Amino acid sequence: MAFFRGLTAVSRLRSRMDRLKKLKSEHGKVQLGNITVDMVLGGMRGIIGMLWETSLVDPEEGIRFRGLSIPECRKVLPTAVEGGEPLPEGLLWLLLTGKVPTKDQVDALSKELLARSTVPAHVYKVIDALPVTAHPMTQFTAGIMALQVESEFQKAYGNGLPKSKLWEPTYEDCLNLIARLPPVASYVYRRIFKDGKSIEADDSLDYAANLSHMLGFDDPRMLELMRLHVTIHADHEGGNISSHTGHLVGSALSDPYLSFASSVNGLAGPLHGLANQEALLWLKSIIQETGSDVTTDQLKDYVWKTLKSGKVVHGFGHGVLRRTDPRYLCQREFALKYLPEDPLFQLLSKLYEVVPPILTELGKVKNPWPNVDAHSGLLLNHFGLSETRYHTVLFGVSRSMGVGSQLIWDRALGLPLERPKSVTMEWLENYCKNKAA
């Protein structure tokens, strides 16, 4: 706990709480917009309905972590190598505190996470009880649930800890969870794809590099990719499935393990985290059917065939963004630097020109531009992590930083139980008739 008190002083917590109280007392009745039937029937798109302090997605600029864009984060956050990708520990510090850390502070956090990373033996036994053929996300979630018996929050709540102090065991659980996910995730990978031969952590490596190492990938370029991957997937405001689910379950005062396990289960859906797997498989299917030297006309035909079959083009479009996802752009920049001749990357570059006009012509998509999922799978594939079924697990490891940071602030700010109102079609029909009368 002393480490966190160094990060966020009690006075800062009180300041944020006072700010929240002032916001409620002075502006609590201010309307934030009108809700339409389309919004209710369309997945609550565009409805402002929750507080999420760690990040915000601007439709035009993309994600901002505590006010900093991805290009800005890549400039100011400490790196492992000069001119390299930001260390995820630096982003975690930023999400927790709102401050850009020094390299010494990031190194201290790396050591803190490493010290917390020991996984109890029973966790591996729980995973081993599942068939090796079980989906990697199933095994990963089982591991998270097995970690839950170590919850400090559960113990503290059971002992009657006052609500105003529940952020303290939440912090302990979240840092422990974040620290222990790389060994759990790598164990799942090695169990399924490498005959169960696990690899021990290297105490000299940072968080993301150690994850890559324990998976079995030590190419310096792969270490850099993993740092970038974890950083850009860590958080994306609170409305996406994984973030919202973690916040929702946490609002019931379920401990961070239970909350994040629900996040991971949401992430496993093909319209959320599993989309990176689907995007890569779709790219490979194009090459299998048309060959690597595909023409623009062949690509157009294939995209239309995909859409007319009732399928979506994974990796394009976004619920909030209205421009190309900056997470896609920084991965493209990485690919241009390290793998410009990769056939899948060259194919995606062509699709960048072909798909948006087709989706625009279709008229059903507000954002036809590529998103983070279009690129992440092919980068991992290039460096040897070609098992597409596993890719979403890495997304899960990354997302723990955003969900965990916000859970700590949820409890510190005393945010209430989330309970939106639902209605039936009959209610909507009657309401609309009465409004029209």
Image (cartoon, rainbow, N blue to C red):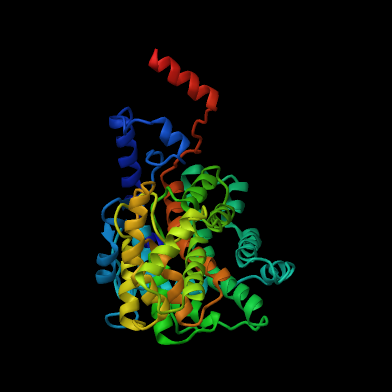
Residue at the extreme bottom of the image, as rendered:
219
Asked if one can make out residue 35 in the rendered structure from this viewpoint, the answer is yes
From the viewer's perspective, is residue 147 above or below residue 331? above
Residue 401 point in image, percent of width and height: 44, 62
In the image, is residue 272 above or below residue 126? above
Nearest to the observer: residue 347 or residue 233: 347
- Can residue 1 be seen from the camera position used here? no
Towards the viewer: 378 or 182: 378
The residue located at (49%, 38%) in the rendering is 418
Q: For residue 70, which quarter of the picture?
A: bottom left
Q: 326 above or below 60?
A: below
Residue 14 location in percent, x, y? 34, 46
Residue 353 found in image quarter: bottom left
- Please state, as top left, top right, bottom left or bottom right, where the C terminus lies in the image: top left
Residue in the picture at 47% in, 35% down: 41
Left or right, 3 with respect to 99, comes to right
| Side of 86 where 203 appears, left or right | right
Q: Position of residue 229 (x, y in %)?
A: 41, 70
Q: Position of residue 375 (x, y in %)?
A: 40, 69
Query: In the visual, does 183 lie left or right of 290?
Result: right
